[in-house]
Image: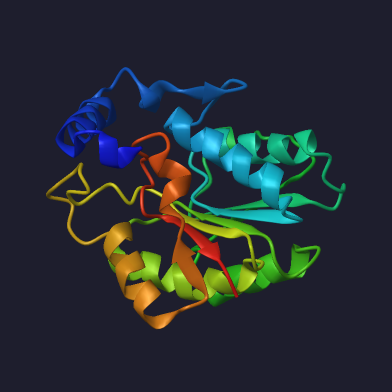
Amino acid sequence: MEGRMNPLLINLFHLIYYNSKESWPKNTFLGYPVMQNPFDLYLYQEIVSKVKPPFIIQTGVLRGGSTLYLACLLDLIGADPSGIVVGVDISLTLEARSLSHPRIRLIEGSSTDIHTVERIKEILPVKGGLVSLDSNHSRDHVLDELRIYREFVAVGSYLVVEDTNINGHPVARKYGPGPYEAIEDFLKEDNHFIRDDYLWQRNLFSHHQYGWLKRIT
C-alpha cells in the first residue's frame, strides 16, 4: 500500500503527529500513561495473538501503561498462568511500581547489566518468547540490547526495537545515531532475524518502523 501513497505526505503526517503534544504523548491504558502510537499498540496485539508468546520482556517501563497493556494481552489470549511480562527499567517510577497485575514482574536495573540479565533468566518460564526494547535510545546501547536479548526470542516471534523513527527517520533529525542505526549494524552480523516491514506498512507509518524484527531461524 505504501507504494501507492506519496511518501512525502506520509512523512509529513508522521512529523505532525509525532510532534503534537496533544496526541500520542497523552494516551493512557486503564489509567496508566502508555505513550504509544495506537497503530503500534494494535500491531502488538496482532503479534501476541498470532505468536502466543509464553513470556514478554520489555526494557524501558517508564510509567507502566505499555507493560500493563502487554500483560492484559496475555490474559486475552488465554495464556498459561506462568506467562509473565518482565519489565526492566534503570529507575522505576512510582506509577510503574503501583502496577498490580499478577503477570507483571518488575526489575530495576540497567537492561544491559549482566546481573539484570541473570535475574530475568531466573524468572522466565521457558527460553523463547517476545522482546520489546524501549530503554536508552543511543545506537551503542540498543546494539548491546539486541545482542543480549536476541537469545530470548523464539523462532517465529519478534524482537521489537522501538522509536526507530528518530534521528531523521523521519523525526528528531538532530538526535544522533539511535535505534535505526543499531538495527542496521545488528542485521549485518545476525542472519537469524529479518525486518518484517509489511507488518507496519499496511498502516503507512509506525513509530517503530523498520524495528519489527522477526526471528526466522
Q: Quadrant of the C terminus?
A: bottom right
Residue 93, image x and y in percent?
52, 40
Residue positioned 49% across, 70% down in the render: 193
- Please tell me in which quadrant of the rendered image residue 172 appears: top left
Nearer-the-camera pick, 160 or 113: 160
Q: Considering only vertical position in the picture, is 181 above or below 91?
A: below
Q: Is residue 21 visible?
A: yes
- Please tell me in which quadrant of the rendered image residue 157 appears: bottom right
Residue 88, image x and y in percent?
57, 55
Residue lying furthest front in this view?
A: 4
- How many dots with numbers? 0
Nearer-the-camera pick, 6 or 127: 6
Residue positioned 58% across, 20% down in the render: 31
Residue positioned 64% across, 62% down in the render: 156
Residue lying furthest right in this view?
A: 81
The coloring applied to the image is: rainbow
Answer left or right for 107 relative to 190: right
Residue lying furthest top in this view?
A: 22
Q: Quadrant of the N terminus?
A: top left
Nearer-the-camera pick, 125 or 154: 154
Answer left or right for 170 relative to 74: left
Residue 40, image x and y in percent?
47, 37
Q: Considering only vertical position in the picture, is 136 above or below 139?
A: above
Q: Is residue 64 visible?
A: no
Residue positioned 19% across, 52% down in the render: 167
Residue lying furthest left in this view?
A: 174
Residue 9, image x and y in percent?
18, 30
